[in-house]
Image (cartoon, helix red, strand yellow):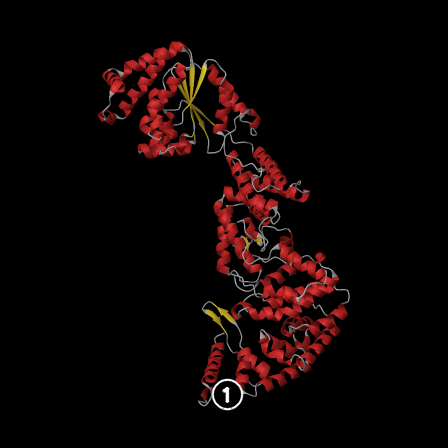
Amino acid sequence: MTTENEKPTPSIVFHADKPIQSVQEDRLGFSPIADNLATSILKMNADGGFVIGIEGPWGCGKSSILNLLCAKIKDEQNISIIKFSPWIIGDKDSMVSSLAEELSEAIKKTGQQNENLAKKMKKYGKAGIKKIAPWAALIPTYGENAKELSDLLSGSLTDLKDELTRALQAIKQTFVVIIDDLDRLEPEEALEITRLIRAVGDFPNVIYILCYDKEILSKSLETALHIKDGNAFLQKIVQASFSVPKPEEFDLRNWMNKECQLLYEEVTGKSLPDNLSSRLQEVCYTHGGKIETPREINLILNSLKLAYPPISEKVDFPDLCWLHLEKIKNDAFYRWIENYLNAFSVVVRGEGHLNGAGQAKMTQELLKHLQITDDIEKQSAMHTIINLSEHIPGIDYVWGDDKTLVMTKPTDEELSALERGHRLGSPSHYRLYFSFAQPAGTLDESELSAIINKANNKTLHADDFNKFIYAKRSQGGTMYSVLLDRLNRTPVEVFTSDGCVTLLQVIAESIDDARREEKDDEAHFKIGIGEIGNKLFQKLLPLIDQKTTFLQDFFTSGASVGWLVSSVIGNEIFAHGKSGLAKKGQPSLTTEELEGAIQIINERLTSTDRDKIESVPDALSFFYRWQQSGDDGAKNLKEWMDEISVTDAGFLELLEKCRGYVVSTNGNYRPLNERELTQLFGNSKEILDRVRNIACNLQNEPDLIKQAEELIEAHKMARDF
């Protein structure tokens, strides 16, 4: 804890992407390379000057080798090190004089006897400006500098260079000029440096060490010179070169694994558990083969150090490490993963689906990112997909024309494991991996835990669920469905028997209110709240000790009669094959328990809860299930429908409730199917004739006529579906 004016001590050190400075920092074996290069320089006869090239991609360790080299030779009395940084100068026309100035200062440090040589080197640099940039002669100059420059221009530059050559040979001092990051210069600047080195590279006892990415520098020279082969031009400058050897993959993987484990300990204050440690090793040693340079390691670690601390308790660490490895190595694939998981979460929540074209497109994109082509071996492709599926759910491998099948829906147990482990594939957690925020429209872990704890302590009430009913999601629907979905995917071990009783009682009290809050176009084109609630009923019922007592109270006092009939009893009707229906699914109730539940519901709907029938959500499903529950149910439904149909207004409202729901590419529709009319009313012709008569009776209220006309159109529409 820090006081108001006290600055907290940072505990996580970010890598500044700087090259190593000492042997103690060397993780990847650069020291022997620097030692061997130092030996060559110390033994080199550089009477004609010499240019050495150290080649390699950005981040491979060129600058680190230079630093180790300098540390090795800096104490040699006959060696002077000059670090020349042309990108700092900015003005390419000043580079000659700047380099000469650096050489002059180095010569001066070798002793007073060489001060005259230092001055001549400085003059040579100024003369070089005029030679490389003739237009500078037009600029007026004054005073001592003007006289000095005029004398140089009137003399012979060749004579001066000859004089410098003889003097440099005489002092027996080797000057090592280091020019790093040559490939980061603009093409014109890179050309200027190479010309400069070519012009002064033959000074005796001057060794140039250039560091660059050969491919990038060659292309820069091609651009600046308008030639086809920049490498050929470069060979005229560099007399000997070597490439920085790629670090051993095993060393890079070890480094990443060790640093990731240290990060976990720094953030959490504890050691990485064995199960996470083994999975982290799998990430580092299987996927870590993609890492090519030390810089990439530092970029991955910095990315993790920024992302992990604020979300450490809400994500899976190995998944996060894998994701950030992919982010640094293949940003396009990283974005594909984000898009895929966004679509995956929508599908598994039942909020949408991925059609065939969308699935094919996503599959082709994945194959491209994974570089799986037609000629790749089956075993290799399968291995790649299996490794990927360790972190991304819903991806199966199918060998054939389709190759990879994405967006296969996981089982409830698999989804529960993802949620429980806060995995990358968890619909409730995936967004955290890509930002610092909880995914929009998801449930915070603390809220879920509070609900479960209250249920287990028998202190949970319907009021605790009301805030979820009226909390709208930007994706559509309410947070109530998210809550039920999370509860459904929570391991049964966390619930006590009392907790299951309390939770199901609260759901039976509140779920019809939640279903009414869902818009019709949402509730019927996805997995609805009722179905999720029924899954939770099936999951928790076996955990209840006093099952008989619970069921009696559940069906007697549960306020949501619509859900009890259309979802709970409706599912059992199909599972038991009641009323001649084909058996579908596994029953949760025995035959005796089901008949008892139906009897209770019939008693309620013909007495105390008769007034609730008109307002039940998803009325058409309710009517069907009530009718299919048995002879008493069918009889009671008919009596209620006859009663409600006495008035024309009540009759039309009843038909409104009998309209179906259809999704098509042209829009969403609510047809009035003759099948429903026949099933529920028995004689569809009589029903439709009555609707037409209402529409044609001009003595009726305009709103009533309009409603009848809309129902006639809805019946016509049904013929198209």
Identify the residue at horizontal 28%, vertical 20% (top origin).
Answer: 127
Does residue 373 show up?
Answer: no
- Based on the displayed image, in which of its 4 quarters is residue 168 positioned? top left
Identify the residue at horizontal 72%, vertical 73% (top origin).
Answer: 594
Q: Is label 1 in a helix, a strand or a loop?
A: helix
| Image position, residue 179 (x, y; %) | 41, 26
Identify the residue at horizontal 36%, vertical 15% (top origin).
Answer: 118
Q: Which residue is mark 1?
A: 689
- Residue nearer the viewer, 371 or 551: 551
- Residue nearer the viewer, 5 or 697: 5
Relative to residue 423, is residue 53 depicted above or below? above
| Image position, residue 683 (x, y; %) | 56, 86
Does residue 301 show up?
Answer: yes
| Image position, residue 67 (x, y; %) | 49, 25
Relative to residue 207, is residue 231 depicted above or below? below
* Crowdedness near tag 1: few (<14), some (14–19) or many (≥20) residues, C-alpha within 10 Å: few
Q: Amino acid at mark 1?
A: Asp
Using residue 503 as the reference point, say whether residue 15 is left or right of it: left
Using residue 357 as the reference point, say whether residue 309 is left or right of it: right
- Residue nearer the viewer, 638 or 381: 638
Q: Image quadrant for the N terminus?
A: top right
How many marks can you see? 1
| Image position, residue 198 (x, y; %) | 34, 23
Using residue 565 as the reference point, say whether residue 83 is left or right of it: left
- Based on the displayed image, in which of its 4 quarters is residue 541 positioned? bottom right
- Based on the displayed image, in which of its 4 quarters is residue 22 positioned? top right
Relative to residue 705, is residue 83 depicted above or below? above
